[in-house]
Amino acid sequence: MTRVFSLVTRILPAAALLLVFAASSPAQSSRITQADVQKLQDSVYLAERDISNLRSRDSARASSLQTELDDLSDEVIYLRVKLRKERTLAQSEYNDVQTRIENVRSRARANGSLSSAPAPRVPDPPVPVA
């Protein structure tokens, strides 16, 4: 009985510590902030500029891309509100919108000179502090 009690008193704290770290890691590693959503908004502005440059070369394609970008701009606003209200946003939601904005930018720049501004990068997830 004493051996069992001794074993439990050694294992239980270690197991509890492991559970705490396991539960906190996923939430911390993919936390999206308002600054990240602002980067999406900045990407929308850059895409608008790219579409504006495209308009002189191919107005039909520019109009199509502008319609797509307008929808993406609405999605960025939705993500901003969702983050403010729910205080959380899935990394996959952020990545999806970011990828689609970059896709619009790429298509807007495909037939002409590349934009002088670099594409914004997807933020690295924060590293949990032990």
Image (cartoon, rainbow, N blue to C red):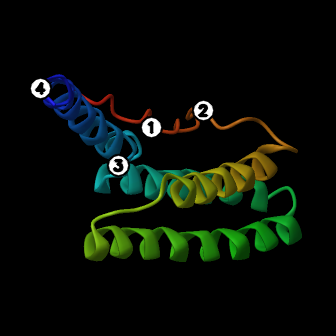
Judge left or right: residue 109 versus residue 79: right
- What kind of element bears circle 3? helix
Q: Position of residue 77 (x, y in %)?
A: 43, 73
Say which of 86 and 122 sits in front. Answer: 86
**The N terminus, quarter of image:** top left
Q: Which residue is mark 3?
A: 27
Say which of 101 and 47 sits in front. Answer: 101
Instruction: Please state which amino acid type lies under the numbered disc 4.
Output: Thr
Residue 116: give its label.
2
Q: CA distance from mark 2 to mark 1?
A: 21 Å
Q: Which residue is mark 4?
A: 2
Which is more N-terminal, label 4 or label 1?
4
Q: CA distance from mark 3 to mark 4?
A: 39 Å
Q: Position of residue 45 (x, y in %)?
A: 51, 57
Q: CA distance from mark 1 to mark 4?
A: 52 Å
Up-down: is 30 above or below 44?
above
